Amino acid sequence: MPPPWRFSKGTQLPEDLPLGMNRLPLNDFRLEPKPFGGFPRILSRTLAWLFFGQAIIVWLRLTSLVGWWPEARWPEGVLIVLGAALLMSSLAAELPGQNIIAVGLLVAGIGGAVHTLNALTAIPFGPCLYLKNAGQLLFPPLPWTLPVLWLLLFLSARGTARAALVP
């Protein structure tokens, strides 16, 4: 019966192992759990195609080359959500998922709290007014797009994702 672990590439069994023993020195190989296999990479590629397709639709709408849904605001919202999903899934392909979710919620929460404080008191960034085009409100002073944009800006900046997420 084969052992329940997999050897990493290039691992050689020691030649001086006595026959009949099922022990292997643990310093010669790494245990590599792969609970999701290639799923994060497939998800990232699928989301990348959807994101770029949506970006083309939004660009065509903004340049007035195509008159698709002239009064609708959902294509821009879908673009923001696809961008956040693409960022999180591409990070999940390389880093622990629980760290990504925790830091994502933390960044979105702090960004939303700062913008809520700003909308109510005008202290950190000065007076601001959110129009109806900013999207529906999560709660009265905060549009839903701002925490997602904080997430996108913070985690996509070079080096901040690695510094915040590496265990």
Image (cartoon, rainbow, N blue to C red):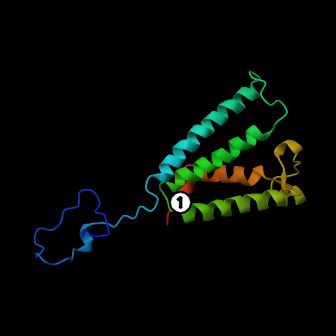
Figure quadrant of residue 30: bottom left
Which residue shows up at 64% across the image and 59% down it? 104
| Residue 39 coordinates in the image, percent (x, y) | 48, 52
Figure quadrant of residue 20: bottom left
Circle 1 packing at 10 Å, graded few (<14), some (14-19), many (20+), is few
| Residue 163 coordinates in the image, percent (x, y) | 53, 60
The residue tagged with tag 1: helix, strand or loop? Answer: helix
Amino acid at dot 1:
Ala
Which residue shows up at 75% across the image and 23% down it? 66
Q: Is residue 40 above or below residue 27?
A: above
Answer with left or right where residue 18 lies relative to residue 159.
left
| Residue 119 coordinates in the image, percent (x, y) | 87, 56
| Residue 109 coordinates in the image, percent (x, y) | 72, 62
Q: Residue furthest top?
A: 65
Answer with left or right where residue 162 lies relative to residue 34.
right
Which quadrant: the N terminus? bottom left
Which residue is disc 1 drawn over?
163
Q: Is residue 12 above or below residue 40?
A: below
Q: Is residue 59 above or below residue 90?
A: above
User: Is there any visible trace of residue 157 in the rendered image?
Assistant: no
Q: Is residue 159 above or below residue 71?
A: below
User: Is there any visible trace of residue 130 in the rendered image?
Assistant: yes
Q: Nearer the viewer, residue 162 or 142?
A: 142
Answer with left or right where residue 48 lies relative to residue 143.
left
